[in-house]
Image (tube, rainbow, N blue to C red):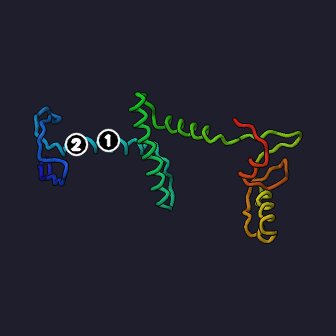
């Protein structure tokens, strides 16, 4: 189909026929436009608004790695804005992008039930502090039992977190596994 507005518009569709719809322009004049053009403009308007909203609160930062930008843009920004649009439509609430992001983060953190503050036992204070690198003592012990000392030295990863109460290097997983914790 070919239609002339300011320029020639060429379209190919299996859904639409050459149905014309009467509309009014900005000046109040009545025009006839193909239904295909009307639907396209309506859908394109939503895409433009979505792109505009995503540009205001973009999590993208300068990076040399282009695939990170694509992942952040597609996975985080686009899906979050689609979820916000659905939320606003279903609930009837008008929530901003920043507030919606904060609510999503809070819900995700509450669902994880990750223990955050360890209990102190007696005089020892168990917490994680950054220090020089060393092997996680719990992982190292498990690897020694599996394949011996040489195997453990090759396989056990080095971490830069230490528990001053135990005087041991511990990865986060082992820290929370070994210590009793209270949940926030």
**Whether residue 58 is situated above or below residue 171 in the rendered picture:** above
- At label 1, counting other C-alpha atoms closer than 10 Å, the crowd grade (few under 14, some 14-19, many 20 or more) is few
Q: Residue at x 77, y 70 (%)?
A: 151
Residue 62 image offset from top left, x and y in percent: 50, 55
Q: Is residue 87 left or right of residue 25?
A: right
Query: Which of the two discs, 1 and 2, labels the residue nearer the N terminus?
Result: 2
Residue 63 image offset from top left, x and y in percent: 51, 58
Which of the two residues, 148 or 40, is positioned nearer the viewer here? 148
In this rendering, does residue 134 appear at all? no
Secondary structure, mark 1, is helix
Q: Residue at x 14, y 34 (%)?
A: 24
| Residue where numbered disc 1 is placed | 46
In this rendering, does residue 136 appear at all? yes
Which quadrant is the C terminus positioned in? top right
- At label 2, counting other C-alpha atoms closer than 10 Å, the crowd grade (few under 14, some 14-19, many 20 or more) is few
Q: What distance separates the C-alpha of mark 1 from that of mark 2?
A: 11 Å
Q: Residue at x 13, y 38 (%)?
A: 21
| Residue where numbered disc 2 is placed | 39
Q: Is residue 137 left or right of residue 108?
A: right
Residue 67 image offset from top left, x and y in percent: 47, 60
Rendering quarter of residue 109: top right
Instruction: Give the total number of marks visible in the rendering.
Output: 2
């Amino acid at each position: 189909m070919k239609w002339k507005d300011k320029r020639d518009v060429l379209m190919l569709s299996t859904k639409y026929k050459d149905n014309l719809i009467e509309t009014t322009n900005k000046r109040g004049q009545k025009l006839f436009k193909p239904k295909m053009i009307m639907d396209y403009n309506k859908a394109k308007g939503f895409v433009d608004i979505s792109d505009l909203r995503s540009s205001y609160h973009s999590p993208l930062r300068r990076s040399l790695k282009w695939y990170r930008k694509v992942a952040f843009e597609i996975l985080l920004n686009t899906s979050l804005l689609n979820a916000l649009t659905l939320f606003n439509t279903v609930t009837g609430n008008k929530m901003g992008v920043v507030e919606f992001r904060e609510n999503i983060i809070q819900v995700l953190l509450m669902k994880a039930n990750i223990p955050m503050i360890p209990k102190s036992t007696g005089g020892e204070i168990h917490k994680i502090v950054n220090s020089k690198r060393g092997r996680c003592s719990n992982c190292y012990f498990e690897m020694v039992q599996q394949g011996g000392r040489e195997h453990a030295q090759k396989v056990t990863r080095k971490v830069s977190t230490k528990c001053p109460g135990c005087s041991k290097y511990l990865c986060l997983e082992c820290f929370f596994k070994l210590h009793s914790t209270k949940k926030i």
